[in-house]
Image (spheres, helix red, strand yellow):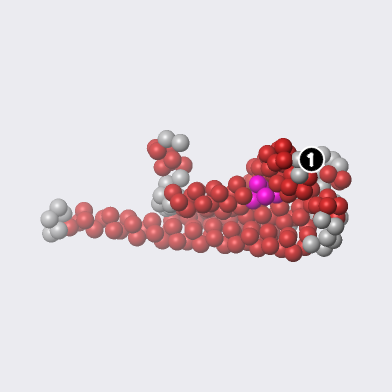
Amino acid sequence: MPPVLTRLLAPRGLHPVLALAGGFVAVLLAQRLWIVDPGVEYGGGPIGWLARVAHSVNLLFHEAGHAILMPTGWEALILLGGTLLQLLVPMLLVGLAVRERRPGALVVVLMLLSASAYSAATYVADARDRALPLITGDSDSHDWGQLVYEIWRAPGVEDPIALVIRALGIAAFVAALAVCVLAGRRWGVDRRAEAVPRRLGPYGR
């Protein structure tokens, strides 16, 4: 990505107003996904639309995980690959945003990771009931239903796995809020620091 476009889309600083807006959106998205929990419909309004966009992006990564591991021929790994890639891609994006010190981008990908973890945890927990609507329309193709009850033959193991993934999602949400607060405060400090040399003049007087 060209440097100018990178600076526009993911600036190193985060204006306090943008930080406040980012934190507000993060809270609304988390409340919609983690508390209201309207299933796969995600409700209406802008936040519902945002949740559906995040779900669509994560679903793309999920299906890509199956396709990438298909040549291995290992059924368990192919089934597991969808959830793994769905979580791994946002985590890699988080690492990239941290390395590049782009707090705005970091807030976005942390929210994406939180939404991805919500989706994955809901899917894992559904292994027993297989009640979620699948894109195949066939409950027998439920990844975690097959893994837990047909391949691993370990009924109940889906609950602790889902709990761990939920913890990851909540941690990502809390981290997004922390970045908003810290980046917003840092923006003001940096601007004040830049203003001091201009007031002092070229010789410090």
Q: Position of residue 117 (x, y in %)?
A: 67, 54
Residue that lies at the very extreme toward the top in this rendered image = 2
Q: Is residue 41 visible?
A: no
Left or right placement of residue 45 versus residue 25 in this view: right
Q: Residue at x 46, y 42 (%)?
A: 9
Residue type beneath disc 1? Ile
Q: Which residues are magenta?
A: 83-87
User: Main SS of the magenta segment?
Assistant: helix
Q: Residue at x 73, y 47 (%)?
A: 77
**Residue 59 is a magenta residue:** no
Q: Position of residue 125 (x, y in %)?
A: 78, 58
Res 114 quadrant in image:
bottom right
Q: Residues within 10 Å of mark 1 (few under 14, many from 20)?
A: few
Instruction: Work out whether residue 11 or residue 134 is closer to the camera in this orientation and state it.
Output: 134
Instruction: Work out whether residue 196 or residue 70 is closer to the camera in this orientation and state it.
Output: 70
Callout 1: SS: loop
Instruction: Work out whether residue 38 or residue 147 is closer to the camera in this orientation and state it.
Output: 147
Q: Is residue 94 visible?
A: yes
Query: For the C terminus, which image quadrant?
Result: bottom left
Residue under circle 1? Answer: 135
Q: Position of residue 197 (x, y in %)?
A: 21, 56
Q: Residue at x 58, y 51 (%)?
A: 91
The mark total stands at: 1
Instruction: Work out whether residue 46 or residue 126 is closer to the camera in this orientation and state it.
Output: 126
